[in-house]
Amino acid sequence: MYYIEHDGGRSEHYKGKREDDCVVRAIAIATKQDYKKVFEDLTYRGLPLGLFANSDKVWRLYLKELGWQETKYGRAAVPLNQMCFTGIAVLNRHMVAVDKTTIYDTWDCQFQRCWRTWTKEEA
C-alpha cells in the first residue's frame, strides 16, 4: 500500500498543524469537498445535539446523508495494507481516506487494523 501525506486542505484555511481532525480530513479527501465546508457541515449538525464535529453520531449521519454506506468487519478486522477499496477506513480511534491501494493522511497508518469502511453507494 502506498502512503501520500495529505492534510485534507486544512492548511488552505488554518495555520499550524491540528491534531484530532482525522474525521474532517478523511471525509474532505474521500468526498472531494473543501476541508472548511466539511468542518462547518459537521459542526452545524453537531451543535443541536451538543456534540462535536468528530462525534461518531455526527459524522455517520453526515456520510449517510451524502449517500455513503458502512461495512462492518467486527472481530474480522483486517490490516489496512491488505485491503483494496475506495472510501474511508475506520481504524482504532482514527479515520483515513483510501483510494484503492493509496492512503491519504498526515501519518502512515497502513499497518493499523480496519474495523469498518465507508464507500459511496452506486446509483
Image: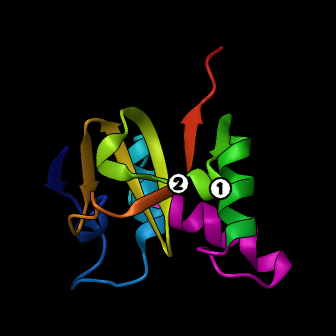
Judged from this view, the residue extending furthest toward the top is 123
Magenta-span inclusion, residue 86:
no
Q: Residue furthest right?
A: 49
Q: Is 85 left, or right, of 58 in this rendering?
A: left
Q: Residue 111, position in %: x, y?
A: 28, 61
- Looking at the image, residue 73 lies above or below residue 56: above
Which region shows up in magenta? 36-55
Q: Amino acid at mark 2?
A: Ala
Residue 113 position in % (x across, y down)? 43, 60
Measure the alpha-carbon separation of dots 1 and 2. Answer: 6 Å
Asked if residue 48 is among those painted magenta in the image, a careful observer would answer yes
| Disc 1 to disc 2: CB gap under 8 Å | yes
What percent of the width, then of the height, locates residue 64? 72, 44
Which residue is tagged 2? Answer: 77
> Residue tagged by mark 1?
74
**How would you rate the neighbour count of disc 1 (Cα within 10 Å): few for under 14, some for 14-19, many for 20 or more?**
few
Quadrant where the N terminus lies? top left
SS under mark 2: loop
Q: Is residue 119 above or below residue 59?
A: above
